[in-house]
Image (spheres, rainbow, N blue to C red):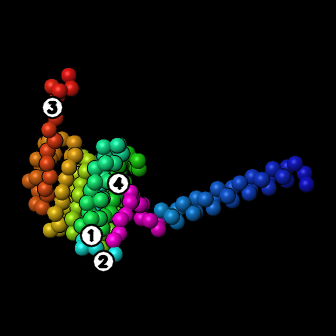
């Protein structure tokens, strides 16, 4: 075998590997409907299913909040589905529509009896789409990122949550 044929053979093989990887990735994304799933805690015969939408940066304090929410709901025999909404990880112009479709698909498979929302971006998403996605379902928010957004959310039907107290003078 000549050197030229060997290079062509290796190049062709590399191209086929790359092409097969792209096909597998594409099928996986299609199958998962642009999954943004953090975790899913399914309890057989649970009393309810709660959706936790978050755009909060993953930090130690957030992980502790998440673990607390998860453990309390499990104790109460409630299943939890956690989804992460962070548009800058994806194409910003399309993330809202991807995420909307993802939540529609999830809600079509099982009806959520409650929604927990954390982070400003997730709060805005929930406010914008709650009437379509969660009609009559209570939406509990925290860590909205701004008190003005928290006040807007509190005015929405079926939204419950709290404002954040920021004491600037303690940080100076």
**Magenta region includes residue 158:** no
Which residue was labeled with disc 3? Answer: 167
- The image quarter containing residue 77 is bottom left
Please tell me whether mark 3 or mark 1 is closer to you in this view: 1
The circle drawn on residue 84 is: 4
Q: Is residue 114 visible?
A: yes
Residue farthest toward the left in the current orientation of the protein: 155
Q: Nearer the viewer, mark 3 or mark 2?
A: 2
Q: Which of the image's four quarters has the N terminus?
A: bottom right
Residue depicted at x 85% and y 49%: 4
Question: What secondary structure is marked by label 1?
Answer: loop
Q: Quadrant of residue 53?
A: bottom left
Secondary element under disc 3, as helix, strand or loop, is loop
Q: Which mark is residue 77?
A: 1
Q: Is residue 117 left or right of 21 when viewed as pictured?
A: left
Q: Residue 45 has which mark?
A: 2
Cα separation, mark 2 vs mark 4, equals 25 Å
Q: Are the residues tagged 4 and 3 within 8 Å (C-beta)?
A: no
Q: For the residues carrying marks 2 and 4, which lies nearer the camera in this image?
A: 2
Classify 10 Å Cα crowding around label 4: few (below 14), some (14-19), many (20 and above): many
Do tag 1 and tag 2 residues touch (Cβ < 8 Å)? yes
Query: x, y percentage for residue 159?
Result: 14, 57
* Of callouts 3 and 2, the N-terminal one: 2
**What residue span does the magenta drawing correspond to?**
30-43
Query: Between 170 and 102, which is closer to the camera in this rendering?
Result: 170
């Amino acid at each position: 075998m000549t050197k030229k044929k060997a290079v062509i053979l290796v190049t062709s093989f590399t191209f086929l590997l790359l092409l097969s990887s792209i096909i597998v990735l594409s099928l996986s994304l299609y199958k998962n409907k642009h999954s943004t799933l953090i975790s899913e805690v399914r309890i057989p015969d649970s009393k309810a299913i709660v959706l936790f939408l978050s755009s909060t940066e993953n930090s130690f304090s957030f992980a502790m909040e998440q673990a607390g929410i998860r453990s309390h709901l499990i104790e109460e025999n409630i299943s939890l589905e956690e989804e992460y909404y962070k548009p800058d990880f994806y194409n910003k112009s399309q993330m809202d529509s991807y995420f909307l479709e993802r939540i529609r698909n999830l809600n079509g498979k099982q009806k959520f009896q409650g929604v927990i929302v954390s982070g400003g971006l997730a709060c805005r998403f929930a406010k914008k789409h709650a009437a379509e996605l969660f009609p009559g379902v209570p939406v509990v928010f925290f860590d909205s990122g701004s008190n003005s957004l928290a006040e807007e959310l509190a005015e929405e039907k079926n939204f419950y949550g709290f404002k954040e107290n920021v004491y600037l003078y303690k940080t100076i």
